[in-house]
Image (cartoon, grey):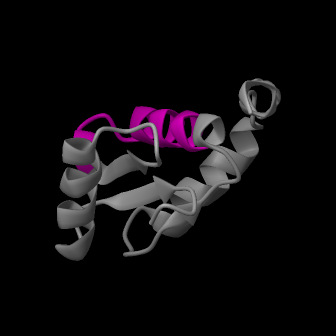
Amino acid sequence: SREEDDDSRDLPQELIADIYAETKDKEGMVFCNSWGTTEEVAVKLKALNPSQEDAYGSHHSSVSKEEREHVEDFARQGKTTPCCTSTM
């Protein structure tokens, strides 16, 4: 629900830094409980590595089909760590 997504905002920066450290040079996926959290995590991870804009991508039901396919293609190539919900 929208309330659930709003409540999930404001993740601790330490958590984002830990996720970044665990994923920056590896293939994998980051699973989140809601699309709001998925967006927040992806944006904050991208901010830690602005020179590689496609290093992190959002994948959830509110993202366009084209964007989901882009994230999937880049993930298969090992170029993106998807931040996703159960849509992946």
On the rendered image, what quadrant is the C terminus found in? bottom left
Looking at this view, is 80 or 31 the one in front?
31
Kindly indicate the quadrant of the structure image that contains residue 35: top right
Counting from the top left corner in percent of width and height, residue 42 is at: 48, 42
Q: Place residue 64 in its image quadrant.
A: top left
Percent x, y of residue 28: 44, 74
Q: Is residue 54 left or right of residue 85?
A: left
Classify 72 as above or below 54. Answer: below
Q: Indicate the position of residue 33 as horizontal and vertical percent values.
A: 71, 53
Does the magenta segment cover residue 46? yes
Observer-nearest residue: 80 or 2?
A: 2
Report the residue at 77% width, 37% height from top.
12
Question: Left or right: 19 with respect to 12?
Answer: left
Q: Tell me where residue 47 appears, x and y as whole percent.
A: 43, 32
Q: Main secondary structure of the magenta part?
A: helix
Residue 11 left/right relative to 73: right
* Residue 52 seen: no
Q: Is residue 65 visible?
A: yes
Q: Was residue 75 drawn as part of the magenta stretch in this picture? A: no
Please report the residue visible at 26 percent of the width from the left and 46 percent of the height from the top.
65
Quarter holding the N terminus? top right
Q: Which quadrant would residue 86 be assigned to in this image? A: bottom right
Segment tinted magenta in the rendering: 38-54
